């Protein structure tokens, strides 16, 4: 008998369970983005956005056999760069939705969790892990949404509509990825008041990962505030920007790395689903940081920029 919400159809068509499907989505998205970036023609049309973007809509209209014209036409399918705010609206709403679904064992949660294979259920996150990771992801989405409203500046920049759709899909998928490897526990062990006792000693993993998450979040917020304070788009002179082109991107990677380690199921070093999520974040932001560095070198002092790391030390 087919399960509601159409989940059976999707998973049966993919020939995998819910965990594998999520991992495949993140890795395929990362691989596709990286592949597109290899071609300068595709990268300039579809990946570069904001002040670094070049005009792509001035080419000839597509005609039969005119590949360049077709690409130019597809590149005109854009949305305002301000649509980035929608990513974090979706992230926050997703966290709220899954909070209710997890704690009250909602039908959508059961539909997805029941489609996790026995192999993945045997090694499961604990209720405490799920709650902490869910809370941290909700905090991340809420902070970024707040920054979008308070640090936003008027802009005519645009981004390719596929980039926008991929971003929305990413945050929807991440809302599920943060708890999916805890399905074994969530389905078999009811939530009790004992899980909320503050007297419970934190694990070593929690002791290190939660502060790491908070430090990276604070650093990213400071970077965003500094960039917002600039009167115009200039070469940042903040101390942390003097050695790293995009430290706020590096902080984003550390945030997802801390979640991947914190959400590791029993007997594992890392949560592979969240690690796949990190792979997409690192590829996407790494390519953007590389483009930013090239743009800085063209627009500002090349000598002052060329030796700076992209996102973290030793990554050029």
Image: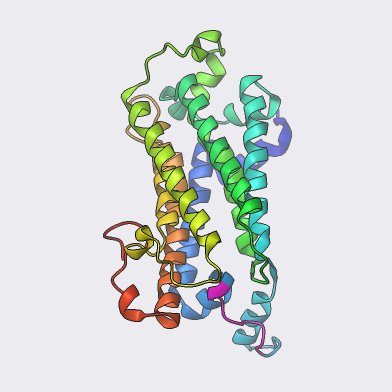
The segment highlighted magenta reads 51-59
Residue 241 versus residue 300 in the image, above or below? above
**Image location of residue 64, percent across then percent down:** 68, 88
Where residue 106 appears, x then y in whole percent? 68, 23
Going 67% across and 52% down the picture, which residue do you hit? 86
**Residue 37, how many percent across, how many down?**
46, 71
For this rendering, which residue is in front, 21 or 151? 151
Q: What residue is rendered at 40% in x and 66% in y?
A: 237
Viewer-nearest residue: 252 or 182? 252
- Camera-nearest residue between 280 and 116: 280
Q: In the drawing, does residue 17 fall left or right of residue 306? A: right
Q: Name the quadrant containing residue 204.
A: top left
Please tell me which residue lies in front, 92 or 26: 92
Residue at screen point 40% across, 72% down: 293
Residue 138 located left or right of residue 202? right
77 in magenta: no
Residue 180 makes an appearance in the image: no
Which corner quadrant of the image does residue 123 belong to? top left
Horizontal arrangement in the rendering, residue 76 relative to residue 233 (left or right): right
Toward the right, the furthest residue is 4
Q: How many numbered circles does the render carry? A: 0
Vertical position of residue 227 compared to residue 68: above or below: above
Quarter of the C terminus within the rendering? bottom left
At 54% from the left and 61% from the top, the residue drawn is 229
Q: Is residue 245 visible?
A: yes
Q: How is the image coloured?
A: rainbow
Instruction: State whether residue 45 is above or below residue 125.
Output: below
- Residue 139 sits above or below residue 53 on the image: above
């Amino acid at each position: 008998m087919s399960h509601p919400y159409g989940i059976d159809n999707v998973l049966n068509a993919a020939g995998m369970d819910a965990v594998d499907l999520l991992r495949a989505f993140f890795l395929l998205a990362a691989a596709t983005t990286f592949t597109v970036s290899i071609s300068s023609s595709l990268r300039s049309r579809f990946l570069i956005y904001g002040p670094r973007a070049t005009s792509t809509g001035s080419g000839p209209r597509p005609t039969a056999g005119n590949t360049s014209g077709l690409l130019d036409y597809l590149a005109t399918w854009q949305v305002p760069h301000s649509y980035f705010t929608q990513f974090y609206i979706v992230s926050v709403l997703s966290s709220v939705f899954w909070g209710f679904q997890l704690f009250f064992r909602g039908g959508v949660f059961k539909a997805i969790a029941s489609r996790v294979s026995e192999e993945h259920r045997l090694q499961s996150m604990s209720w405490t892990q799920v709650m902490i990771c869910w809370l941290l992801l909700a905090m991340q989405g809420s902070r970024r949404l707040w920054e979008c409203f308070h640090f936003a500046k008027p802009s005519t920049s645009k981004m390719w509509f596929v980039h926008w759709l991929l971003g929305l899909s990413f945050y929807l998928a991440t809302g599920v990825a943060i708890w999916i490897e805890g399905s074994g526990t969530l389905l078999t062990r009811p939530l009790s008041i004992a899980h909320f006792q503050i007297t419970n000693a934190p694990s070593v993993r929690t002791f290190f990962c939660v502060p790491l998450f908070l430090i990276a979040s604070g650093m990213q917020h400071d970077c965003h505030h500094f960039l917002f304070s600039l009167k115009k788009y200039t070469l940042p002179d903040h101390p942390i920007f003097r050695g790293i082109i995009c430290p706020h991107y590096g902080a984003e990677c550390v945030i997802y790395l801390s979640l991947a380690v914190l959400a590791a199921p029993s007997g594992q070093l890392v949560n592979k689903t969240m690690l796949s999520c990190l792979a997409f974040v690192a590829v996407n932001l790494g390519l953007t940081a590389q483009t930013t560095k090239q743009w800085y070198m063209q627009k500002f002092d090349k000598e002052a920029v060329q030796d700076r790391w992209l996102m973290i030390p030793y990554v050029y």
